[in-house]
Image (cartoon, grey):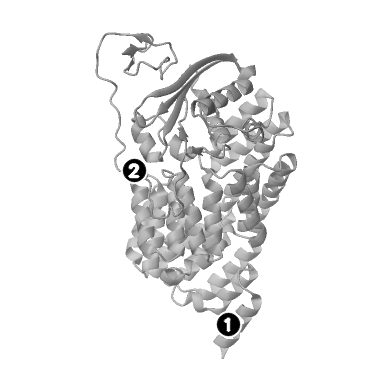
Amino acid sequence: MKRCPQCNRIETNDTLGFCRIDGTHLVFDSLTSDSTATQTLGSQSPNRELATQPSQRGPSIAVLPFADMSADASNEYFCDGLAEELLNALGKIENLKVAARTSAFSFKGKDVKVSDIGEALNVQTVLEGSVRKSGNRLRITIQLIDAADGYHLWSDRYDREMSDIFDLQDEITLAVVDALKVKLLGEQKAAVLKRGTDNTEAYEFYLKGLYHFNQWTGEGWRKSIECFEKAIEIEPQYAPAYAGIANSYHFISHVGLHAPHEMAPRWKAAALRALEIDPDLAEAHWALADLNYFYEWDWAEAEREYKKAIQLNPDDAYPHQSYGLFLTTTKRFDEALAEVGRALELDPLSPHVNFIAGATCLFADRLDEALGFVRRMRDLQSGVHLGHWLAGDVFSAQGNHKAAVEAFEKAIALGSTQNTLSHLGCVYGLAGRREDALGVLKQLLEMREGEYATAFNIARVYAGFGEADKAFEWLSKAVDERNGELVFLNGFIQAGAKESWGKDFHTDPRYKDILARMGLIERETAQRTAAITET
């Protein structure tokens, strides 16, 4: 048995060299004590209903967020960023399965058994570490653990200057690869060790940008753009920072914080600039794919870019889930479910990925499976609004408007966006609560007069209480404005969800015209439908 002389933590594994808390050399100790109590995960095994592709064989790893042992609490961004950069580097290795960031980082600050983490993420090994940063001095402790038995496969401690950070990252990455007994060929090794900059100041701003981006809030995305731009001021050829800007503009636009026509040019310019510097940057291809999907409605180009992003980084869950949504828009549901299943396999504990999986089932008219994801999300994080939002959509598709209202009201109470408010206004109307629906409509119109509210969200509320003319008037504006959520319109009007926008909405000839303007059906089909309806 070993003990840390600094914090007195007891380690029962004698192969461990350094304390997992503060990096101090462990000493042998004959004293016995109960080990630190650990939190049990409970039933959190990944939902396998959509995992249509077989699990990868061979080595697999989860990189946990590094513990911050610095005196300055503001260094949290640096610890998270180092772990994420290591995760991204390992993710480029073809024969190594790497758990996605969201799922791996869900254990941050929790005292959970390594075996439970391995089971939850379906990985064989877990990498954990700690960082102590003081001025330009760094002390980093890394440990690779066998998830099945807790045996420490490798551990080391590094005392370096901040100026050595890039060489240190390479050293750690190669040491982990060696411990996993993974072979790297020359070309693949170059890709794994590839970096966007050699400037440590620019790199720190980039890590701050990643930290703010991963807060998944409007304010977080705005701050991330500021940090990425500062990185670029220092290092103009920093391709990952440009990709970060592109993806931040995407999400600011998608949640309705700003008009798409204001964000899209900046989104596109940043993505193209990233690819001009580095044509093989997967994050930039993903950003460009989303631009073609949600804004430009260039379906062929969107699919090419999604496939390119997945080819370059197959272990990134985001392109898989986005491509899955794209496939639902084009009604290729079997392919969509396969892509979302792959995202789930990579990122099983992510509420966002589970939400996308549930929405895919909804659009494919597999409502029972969609409700399964509602339960799954509530088990994962009951305080996150996405599970209640998905429940509202499924109940609405089933025609259970009372339950849908309750679900959307819970989602809004947890702090969701104008999109959820719009859904609530629609089901208020469908439930016969016209005055409540009008109240929501008033809020959205006031938002539009202030910062911004999408025409699509306003159209949905009008449709809910039967104002078809107004609904199609605002849908037409939504097409003009290129509102991103329009790509889901056809999904909401699938067989099981025909009443989600009101009775007979899907049979109105103007509905087909909207789809034709988006290039989802031929305009001649829409005109033919209109002529038949009129006669």
Position of residue 394 relative to residue 53, above or below, is below
| Residue pictured at 28% horizontal, 25% vertical | 37
Q: Quadrant of the C terminus?
A: bottom right
Label 2 sits on what residue type? Gln
Residue that label 1 marks: 529
| Residue pictured at 68% horizontal, 42% vertical | 280
Q: Find residue 197 and report its horizontal and vertical position in percent.
A: 69, 29
**Pointer 2 local density, CA inside 10 Å: few below 14, some 14–19, many at least 20:** some
Place residue 9 in its image quadrant.
top left
Label 1 sits on what residue type? Thr
- The mark that comes first in sequence, 1 or 2, is 2
Residue that label 2 marks: 44
Q: Quadrant of the N terminus?
A: top left
Q: Find residue 476 and report its horizontal and vertical position in percent.
A: 61, 69
Q: CA distance from mark 1 to mark 2?
A: 48 Å
| Residue pictured at 63% horizontal, 23% vertical | 166
Q: How many marks do you count on the picture?
A: 2
Question: Along the line of sight, which residue is nearer the eye, 467 or 485?
Answer: 485
Give the left or right position of residue 178, taking residue 6 as reference. right
Position of residue 96 relative to residue 142, above or below, is below
Residue 418 visible in image: no
Question: Along the line of sight, which residue is nearer the eye, 81 or 369?
Answer: 369
Q: Find residue 270 and report its horizontal and vertical position in percent.
A: 70, 44
Question: Along the line of sight, which residue is nearer the eye, 375 or 348?
Answer: 348
